[in-house]
Image (tube, grey):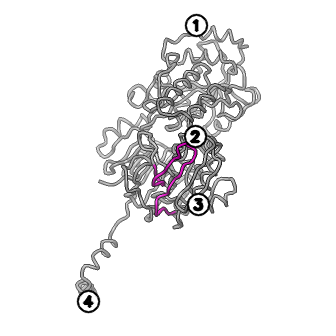
Amino acid sequence: MQRRTFIASAGALAGLDLIPFAACAQAKRTLFRWVPANDLTLLDPTFTTATITACHAMQVFDNLFGSDSSYTTKPQMVSEYSIDPAGLVWDLHLRPGLKFHDDSPVRTQDVIASIKRYGKSNPLGQTFMGLVTELSAPDPQTVRITLSKPFPLVAYALSGPASSIMPERIISASDGVAIKEIVGSDPFKFIASKWVSGSQVVYEKFEAYVPRADGQSSNTAGPKVAHIQDLKWQIINDRATAVAALQNNEVDGIETVDNDFIPVLSKDPSIRLIKGSVPSIPLMRFNHLQAPFNNVLMRRAILAVVRQNDYMTAANGADFPEYWSDKVGVFAPGTPMANDAGLEKLTGKRDFDLARKLIKESGHNGQAIVLLDPVDSPTHHASALITADLFKKLGLKIDVRSMDWGSYLQKRNNQDAPEAGGWNVAFTAMVGTSNLDPASNLGIRGTGKQAWFGWPTNQKIEDLRTQWFYAKDLAERQELCRQIQLQVFEEVPYIPLGAIYNLMAVRKEWLDFQPEGPVFYTTHKA
């Protein structure tokens, strides 16, 4: 009997049993190739605020609660929860069937260890854990959180990448440092053997993941149903090379599209441009430890002449205003905490006479002001050039220190006087969800040398921030954010320079792409 005859005969004898086998044998794994904005070098989301690490965590680690695209916190690993009448005891009931990528079950011990770890290293986690008197497990599926006083934002505090749930054994082995073994319980698992820093990051679908049965998939809330089997991040640092790879179908999406490429990509019928939902806010940061900007009069003088439109057009051009905004305050435009309190100090008539008067009243001695200029960051380089010109118009002497981004990140942490290697003015941006509220906004912190670089001291803002955590409802939190913004424009810890919406590009055969994060649970081919 010839081989093909035997196969045909065997197929006839086996009947339908061979049909699914043949279909599986011929099935092709779906691969999505993504170019992130930066290389992934740090893997532990609890030990860094790096945006790329948070994005990585959103693919691999699950959270007790998730957040939808309207920033509403909803249960995720938690099936349901209850709060006692006094608001002091929260019982979180875990969904059945939760498993880690090493096939071990998610236990209450893992959740408790993860929460404790989060509470040691993350600012919001520290605030939350400062109120926790006990973490316990009254039964194998329930985690009980007992508080010293009511904290309305428990669910919110347990919804972000920094509060990712990990196996207890990995946390114990890490001994208070960044974890080395990446084992989560989300729809995608990290393939460490294929990770090449500077080249690629590889994830595979976790077939044992059980999505929620209720709700609608949105950001990290609702059912996380992965339609792709393989997710590959390809590290391409040159933006033009990344765009060419997208056009040639060598990649399926890129996270950041510079405005220079909008005309050509917008005309390409195979590509869809996607505007990010939450903008980044570039900012001018003052060194509050050193003269002259340790004097609030100097900071107010600069605020009086900054025009956000000048900074935004210099960084982004005037041809695509839909991708940037001026008239921007402390919190991201279009989000619940955004408001216009005190904004007239940025949007009113620019007053150089007032600025010169304030500079004189401050007693500034005419010393050169050191500006840090990260020349390989287009937005911040443009900000440095605009600011240098502004200072010259005010009669201020300047010393522009040009450097690459890596050197800048080291330099900005130097608290010494400018003549001893320090600085006076620097530029950065708070990315996306870092601008949502007082919990995530590092720029407003007023804790002196323990604060974000620039090191302002402002007890009033700290007190308002603390009140925000305990506000009884959304209206009260919004009012507190108005008061915080008024204080920011009074004391000027930094100056927001506008808002820039990240522009992504995806090939059109891919549907239901979620720009928040981004996450790839819903992404599928047409």
How far is the residue under mark 3 from the one under mark 2? Answer: 28 Å
How far is the residue under mark 3 from the one under mark 4? Answer: 55 Å
Residue 213, given in percent of the width and then of the height, sits at 38, 56
In the figure, is residue 309 to the left or right of 320? right
- Magenta-drawn stretch contains 287: no
Q: Relative to 381, is 114 above or below?
A: below
How far is the residue under mark 4 from the one under mark 2? Answer: 78 Å
How far is the residue under mark 3 from the one under mark 1? Answer: 61 Å
Q: In the figure, residue 462 lies in which quadrant?
A: top right
Q: Secondary structure at mark 4?
A: loop
Q: Secondary structure at mark 1?
A: helix
3 or 2: mark nearer the eye? 2
Q: State the residue position of label 1.
A: 353
Q: State the residue position of label 3.
A: 167
How far is the residue under mark 1 from the one under mark 2? Answer: 50 Å
Between residues 248 and 43, which one lies in front from this camera angle? 43
Q: Which segment did they paint magenta?
A: 75-99
Within 10 Å of the Cα at label 1, are there few (<14), some (14-19), or many (20+) other Cα atoms? few
Q: Upstream in the sequence, badge 3 or badge 4?
A: 4
1 or 2: mark nearer the eye? 2
